[in-house]
Image: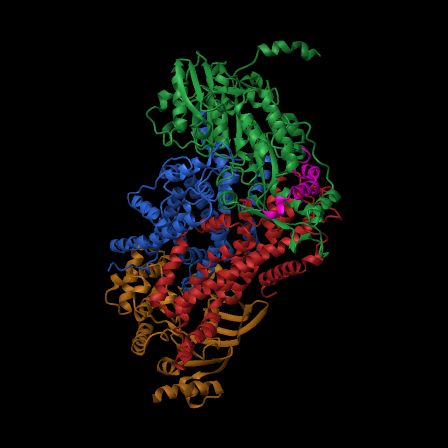
Amino acid sequence: MDNLLEVKNLKVEFELGAKAISAVNGVNLSIKSGEVVVLAGESGSGKTVTAMALTRILAPNARIKGGEIIFNGIDLLKSEERDLVKIRGKEIAYIFQEPTSFLNPVYAIGEQISEAIILHQGKSRKDALQEAAKLLESVKIKDPQRILESYPHQLSGGMNQRAFIAMSLACKPKLLIADEPTTSLDVTIETEILKLLMDLKRDFGFSLLFITHNLSIAKKIADRIYVMFRGEVVEEGTMQSIFVSPRHFHTRELIAAYEKIGKI
Amino acid sequence: MVSYIFRRLLGIIPLLLGITIISFAIIHLAPGKPTAVEQTMNPRVSPEVRLRLEKLYGLDKPLPAQYMNWLARLVKFDFGRSFTDDRLVLQKISERIPLTLTINILSLIFIFLIGIPLGVKSAIKQGSLFDNITTVFVFLLFAAPTFWLALLFMQLFCIRLGWLPISGITSLDYEYFSWWQKIPDLARHLFLPVLVSSIGGLAGISRYMRSSMLEALHQPYIYTARAKGLPEASVIYKHGLRNAILPIVTIVGLSIPGLLGGSVIFESIFALPGIGRLFFEAVMSRDYPLIMAEIVLGGVLTMIGNLVADIAYAYVDPRIKYKSS
Amino acid sequence: MKNPYLITGVIIIGFLSLVAILAPFISPYDPAMIDQNSLLVGPSLKHLFGTDSLGRDLFSRIVYGSRISLSIGIIAVGISVSLGVFLGSLAGFYGKVIDTLIMRFVDIMLCFPTFFLILAVVAILEPSIFNIMIIIGLTSWMGSARLIRSEILSLKEREFIQAEKALGASNSRIIIRHLIPNAIGPVLVNATLGIAGAILLESGLSFLGLGVQPPVPSWGNILIESKATLGIAWWITVFPGFAILVTILGFYFIAEGLKKIIG
Amino acid sequence: MVAFLFLPAFVFSQDYGDAFIEASIADARTLVPILASDSASSSVTGLIFNGLVKYDKDINLVGDLAESWEIEEEGLVIVFHLRKNVLWQDGHRFSAEDVEFTYRKLIDPNVRTPYSGDFERVKSLEILDDFTVKVTYKEPFSPGLSSWGMPIIPKHIFKNEDLNKTQYARKPVGTGPYKFKVWKTQEKIELESYRDYFEKRPYIDRVVYRVIPDEATIFLELQTQGIDSSGLSPLQFSRQTETPFFKQYYRKFRLPGFNYTYMGYNLGNPKFRDKRVRQALNYAVDKDEIIKMVLLGYGQTATGSYVPQSWAFNQQVKPVAFDKEKAKSLLAEAGWVDTDNDGWLDKDGMLFEFTLLTNQGNEERAKVSQIIQRRLKEIGIRVKIKIVEWSVFLTEFIDKRNFEAILLGWSVPREPDNFDIWHSSKTKEGEFNFIGYKNEEVDRLLIEARRSFDQDFRKTCYQRIHQILYDEQPYMFLFVSESLSALHNRFRGIKPAAIGIGYNFIEWWVPKQEQKYRIAK
């Protein structure tokens, strides 16, 4: 199986006034088609920055200082913005941590989902809304019409996250990047969402890059795992290899945290 | 919603009472009596006459009685007559309204038309040369005393270049003009006043818009919009601007009392018969009924403005809904 | 150059404050010295900024004027901020009746045509520097009060305040040691803008003849003379106008810089 | 020379038309002339209405609506013979009824007129026939004659109106050379010529008063020819209008003023009770310097309550020369010396300092007070300057006698009777002898003069008063300022005289080819 995505020696810096702070420093990772890869690490370790860098949607003061991001054989770092916008949302889609704030408060859910469909598939607004309703059904939402007309603040976090997932899947992406999608939700909803994601993966057949600080989640879903620490990947391997013989102290810390939670 | 508005309107009454009692006390307890603004003593005006005039104005009664009297008439929308020329106060105010309103509305349009794009552009290009130049430029406008700027403009546009008339609203032969001559004539007269009265607001709105837009552009949903593959223009204008512009609605509401307010300074310089001068002269000549009427008008408008701002905001921002309970 | 606005602003205002403090050493003449032989003389080595219509040295008047104008701005805003912070923190911290009362009062003051109050007081009680400072202060505190109140409302639920309370700290200690210092950022920005506003307001009052009265030189009343000398004494238009402009700009820059620091 | 020869031809071809645009710093308050006390209202009503008498160019009383008059019974009675050919601007005939009506309204306590004082001395007013009116005074009152310069208002318009609230306050009907046309509040008042005016049809068709509340704007308007006439400050007169533009388009006029500025002492204050102190102060202040600095030379030293062009003025009274030493020695005589060498005079342990009070909004007075402050400092007197708003100035300081010294000015009426200012009975609150001046001779002369219609006798009285006042120095008389103005030079027919230039306004005209504004319908 070829790599769907291959990241080589990625470096990202942030400009803060006159200073530059390195956030990602030479990350290498790869994802094969259909694979579930977890990117683990404590907050601030550079996971999210890495994820955002993949389609270059970083904050304006971030600078990609080097490396390659090869997706489907194309180096995204060398692509023009106009080519990138065709990949974002269509080939590579994202789910974020806090669905309620990552959804635009002034547009109804339907509007936000259909936006990408109209854009990437050239459908009419009416067709796009129908498509959106179907997508909502596929994320196990019972009354899609009501949700389509609702605004984010009117829905619960879990509901918003389902809607968000539906939005991300609108164009059947090859790669879904989920950045701590369950962190802001409570545990029962977390389980539901995780289950949903895995079901959807089966149905839609995307690869999943799942970012979390929580190894218990990783253990449930991951084929392979990368552990990041201070902007670098410090360990990679299958779940088993990492749990059995963690080499880096940070991995051991994460495992310790997991075991502590497990005991409670 | 209806009951919400009703409750808010009821809430105006105690505030208004507070305002009027304070102002009534201030203006009546303050030294000075209703006299001509004219700064000459006229030996032909005998002191007996002055006393008689005071009696005719009812100023010999105790203050609370005067206030109750005034309040009783206010309930019937009777604001009384001006001390200076015995004309109905309402009439004196209302004849100033069209001009004041015109200038203020034109200024408001001008402010929004220029200020919003300027602020948005600054925010998008945050830190760029454009941003820094507009920031400094806007601060400069803000920093200049109005009358000074007005005089500089007059010397430049009216004397040096001779493009615009100095003051007034119309040319003297205006009545003999046909409509296609009237409109440019009005425009030429109003240009500088509108420009000068816009400057503060222009600077304010563009700064406000800049920070509001900056805030919007740093919101998480902007990343979502980008991640969806939306073109940058769509990201900025559809997702950023729409959110950033919401508070402007509030500002429009809050501008309502300002629409009927005037600035005595630029009205004096441009010789415009606006409300600002009326109020100023009323204060200087201790024209109590007129002062009180303007305070009531100002207070009511401010409160209505706040209400309109709140309602309008609820209307445009789906996050806010007033419970009608 | 991390914060160019702040640095520029501080340099400008620092320089002006220095000028104000050192006025007697800087000015070459007594600012009130009338000289009937040099009425309206243009800038020269003898009179750097020229003279006014009483033959007084404009440079000296502007230098001394900086004392008046800056102190009007700073003291007026000092009054307004103290009042605003005091009432705002009372309202925010104690809530309930006190909050309602204070905020109603704020509402009344906000609906009040403040310009009228200023006019009335200044016109009626003579426009001394003192009165102008006080009245500007007394009519401009509402913004600070609202800001501090809302900051405190959100702060007081935070853990460290709850912890202090649990440890039995007195209310005034919590307010003064914890709430106000944490909430003061936006108020400072507001205050800086307020100083600028007060200086401009004084010049506006001068236009109406209600500013600081001569012979005391304020930038406002110096600039006003430019009206009477239109076209023949550009220096009276330019120098005091620029003094005001640069000062206000300085304060705006500081405010902008502060905003950046608070984030 | 050639031009002179052709002059008569021009005289015959005086053209009608054009407009005269004047700036007014304030709007008129009312166009009911007997209520109007502000100068804006008065200058408008002055063109719309006539009194029975008026002053001619040499400041002599002549008939206006009255053709002639007789003074009878040793001044107790004045009989006015009215013009018979006068029509109100609405076509009604003017008659004695209107005069009587005006008088009734002037003394009606319910009418808010400030001018009742002079007319309350009238015992009765009788209509002898349609065009003859007999006015009987309680006692002879010579200033009464000039008080009949009060504009006469039409009975047929006002008889059923409350004068205080009448709509005609904003659309007056008079007998004068100009008819009311339109009043846009705070913007302009426009008049048009009354073709049937009893003297003659005025040449200028329209007169427009534009309200421009700011002096700087008025001057800028002159610079763009937006107005035809405006008063000028000394600085504008001497410097700002000395440009090719102004020389091309404007004529400037420099006329003697009817005013004087003074520093008045509160004579109840022990510091100022001693005449020598007041005289010393007069020596210590250099009036020439003030005139040079504040008026840029456009004025002269005042020596009393009358202006030099008035018949009451005493030429013999000469202003004292500026003399610091003389001032010091007079003060020393009065006991004021610097005993402790601190630079300030003292007496009985009391420092010589006082507050000089003046009103806001008058740049000239602010400057004068600063010059006086500096000069008095040189002889060891400390002056504080306090500038207060007009209404407060009147009610809190003047009326309550709550001042040490004031800097003020009087405008000087054509009628020299100034009983109200100097007579010792006029010191109550609200009256005008607020400095508390009392001199028996002056009191007597004031009364004798106002009881006599003999101008020579009155002249000796007033000249003596002039002399006494300058010697006693209840005021430090400072200066009489000239009235400076600019007038667009397309206007012809202007003949400056002692009284000013406006007296023959109906003779002014503009040649057709130079006319600027359209002809009114």
Residue D486 shown left or right of residue B8 in the figure: right
Chain A rendered in what hue?
orange
Instruction: Give the extent of the magenta segment.
Output: D269-298
The chain whose colour is green is D
Which secondary structure type mostly characterizes the magenta part of the structure? helix
Say if D130 sits above or below D338 in the image. Answer: above
Residue B112 colored in magenta in the image: no
The chain whose colour is red is C
- Where does residue D68 sit, x and y in percent of width and height? 49, 14
Q: Quadrant of the N terminus of chain C?
A: bottom right
Residue D116 shown left or right of residue C1 in the figure: left
Q: Nearer the viewer, residue B65 or A219?
A: B65
Tell me which residue sits at (44%, 57%) in the image: B236
Residue D381 shown left or right of residue B111 in the figure: right
Residue D99 shows in the view: yes
- Where does residue C102 sit, x and y in percent of width and height? 38, 62
The chain whose colour is blue is B
